[in-house]
DNA sequence: CTATTTTATCGGAATTAGCGCATAATAGGG
DNA sequence: CCCTATTATGCGCTAATTCCGATAAAATAG
């Protein structure tokens, strides 16, 4: 489970994986994050213009958080981290 | 340097610190990130509705990146991480 | 294969980022 | 102190999220 989050797609994939690991539906996660199911759908599919506060709310609902770190050269495991 | 980024404010502060460490003005950073100086100003002051792609572009311009990790209990050093 | 859950999508309304252009306000150096 | 570089705001505009209320479409269960 790579936690690298350089693109909206990667973030969306990580959100989806974390949500499924907790056996939550988009609707359930949406409720906990205070947003709509539609919004979760957009985020998981990589909406690049999502609002920062929305992403943060979703991560918090999943007991996750961002960390800002020095950019590292992407290793083989991270290349094209689509799924 | 705490890289915890739970709120737009924390992210803004981290961006500002990283920018200054590199001796860049908002205008210079804006150019590198492909946005406007005003946008950098807003981000640094904690604009909660900033677009995700904008934040990612700014971080990339600073050679930084997000990582998504399990939320940890905020230690004493992170409490009220305003500056 | 059918029914139910889950996810993706639609129209409209409201809100707001980010752009262009421009200028106050603030900070810093000489 | 003053002048300059830097940062914070301003207005009009376009574009796009997000909300609301629903509903297709897709996936899963029975």
Image (cartoon, coloured by chain):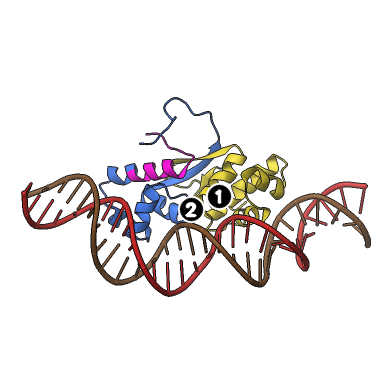
Chain colours: A blue, B yellow, C red, D brown
Horizontal side of C24 relative to A29 (left or right) equals right
Foreground pick, B33 / A62: B33
Quadrant containing the N terminus of chain B in the rendered view? top right
Which chain is disc 2 placed on? A
Foreground pick, B75 / B81: B81
Give the residue displayed 36% in from the left and 49% down from the top. Answer: A62
Horizontal side of A44 relative to C7 (left or right) equals right
Foreground pick, C2 / A26: C2
Residue B67 belongs to magenta span: no
Q: Residues within 10 Å of mark 1 (few under 14, many from 20)?
A: many
Q: Which residues are magenta?
A: A1-16
Q: Which residue is identified by label 2? A: A49
Q: Which residue is identified by label 1? A: B54
Percent coordinates x, y for residue B76 in the rendering: 52, 47
| Image quadrant where residue D7 sits | bottom right
- Is residue A57 visible from the viewing direction of this image? yes
Q: Is residue A2 above or below residue A51?
A: above
Dot 1 lies on which element?
helix
In the image as oriented, which residue stretches furthest toward the top?
A: A76
Percent coordinates x, y for residue B16 in the rendering: 65, 48
Q: Residues within 10 Å of mark 2 (few under 14, many from 20)?
A: some
Which mark identifies residue B64?
none
Marks 2, 1 in one chain: no
Give the residue displayed 62% in from the left and 46% down from the top. Answer: B34
Q: Is residue B22 above or below residue B48?
A: above
| Image quadrant where residue A28 sits | bottom left
Percent coordinates x, y for residue D30 in the rendering: 6, 50
Foreground pick, A29 / A44: A44
Horizontal side of B13 relative to C10 (left or right) equals right
Distance, label 2 to label 1, CA atoms, is 8 Å
Dot 2 lies on which element?
loop
């Amino acid at each position: 489970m790579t936690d690298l989050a350089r693109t909206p797609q990667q973030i969306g994939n990580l959100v989806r994986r974390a949500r499924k690991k907790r056996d939550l539906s988009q609707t359930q996660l949406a409720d906990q994050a205070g947003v709509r199911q539609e919004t979760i759908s957009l985020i998981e599919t990589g909406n690049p213009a999502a609002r920062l506060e929305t992403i943060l709310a979703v991560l918090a609902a999943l007991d996750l958080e961002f960390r800002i770190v020095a950019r590292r050269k992407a290793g083989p495991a991270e290349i094209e981290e689509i799924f």
